Amino acid sequence: MAASSLEPLKQESTPAIIARKIRSAIGNGEFSPGAQLGEADLARRLGVSRGPLREAMQRLTQEGLLVSIRNRGLFVAQFTHADINDIYLTRTAVERGAALKIIEVDHTNRHAGEELMGIVAQMAALGANPSAVSQIDISFHEALVRLAGSPRLSRVHDTLVTETRMCLSALEQLDFPIADRVAEHRRIAQAILEADVPELHSALADHMDSAIAQLLDPLSATPYRDHEAS
């Protein structure tokens, strides 16, 4: 007997919703790296009981966004230079896999490449507005992974994007010319649009290397983590 198309709807659990909200707050800089998260305060602000809150915070600890310090509590993670390199290494692997999947599936109708080029056009139209450009920058990479149609790649990428937002929000300013950012994203989108796999590999690698350099240079003078996980 064929499976019914009328499967029960899957609703997001309360801990998952709480985790998503805290993850978003961390990514947006509402909770800065190293900040302590108080359970009572979070439960009050979110209007939830402590049971699902604790489960949500455990999820975020497993994702590496929160760090448990023995006898002290939970803190937003802080990243070393090695952490930042590893974040971008993993992002490269995930986004490369997503882009290759897009090329494999979408190379005939070019829908995904055109959508990404549209996001690049939005980025270019923003002009000298680094904060707004950063938001579109993140949207580009989220769309790239979403367009691959892989729930697992998207799930992994969600944590990586939050970590990327944390890196960016921790810096007072980034000396990264907007024209260069636009050009790098256009190059990636164009490679996907033209199903040019060698160029895709090169464009993604160059983009990630450039981002790492921009992040690490301002952080080179000071340590970026002072807590040790329990």
Image (spheres, rainbow, N blue to C red):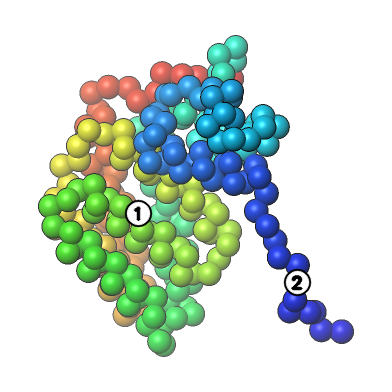
Task: Please report the residue visible at 49 percent of the width from the left and 51 percent of the height from the top.
Answer: 158
Is residue 111 among the parts visible in the rendering? yes
The answer to whether 129 appears left or right of 19 in the picture is left
State the image quarter where residue 179 is shown: bottom left
- Residue at the top extreme, as displayed: 71
Q: Amino acid at mark 1?
A: Ile
Of residue 178 and residue 221, the one placed in the foreground of this image is 178
Count residues near mark 2 (Cα–Cα under 10 Å), then give few for <14, some for 14-19, many for 20+.
few
Nearest to the observer: residue 84 or residue 110 = 110
Q: CA distance from mark 1 to mark 2?
A: 33 Å
Counting labels gives 2
- Give the numbered dot on residue 138: 1
Answer with left or right where residue 160 lies relative to residue 195. Answer: right
Q: Residue at x 65, y 42 (%)?
A: 15
Could you tell me residue 191's position as x and y percent? Answer: 30, 73
Quadrant (top left/top right/bottom left/bottom right) for the C terminus: top right
In front: 125, or 66? 125
- Please identify the residue farthest to the bottom as the structure is shown: 108
Depicted 72 relative to depicted 55: above or below: above
**Rendered location of residue 105, percent (x, y):** 49, 80
Residue 177 lies left or right of residue 86; in this view the side is left
Q: Which residue is mark 2?
A: 7
Residue 175, percent across and down?
15, 42
Inspect the image, locate mark 2, and give the three-letter code of the amino acid beneath it: Glu
Q: Quadrant of the N terminus?
A: bottom right
Say above or below: 126 vs 213: below
Which residue is at a point 36% across and 58% down the rendered structure image?
139
What residue do we see at 32% from left, 77% from top? 114
Can residue 196 be seen here? The reply is no
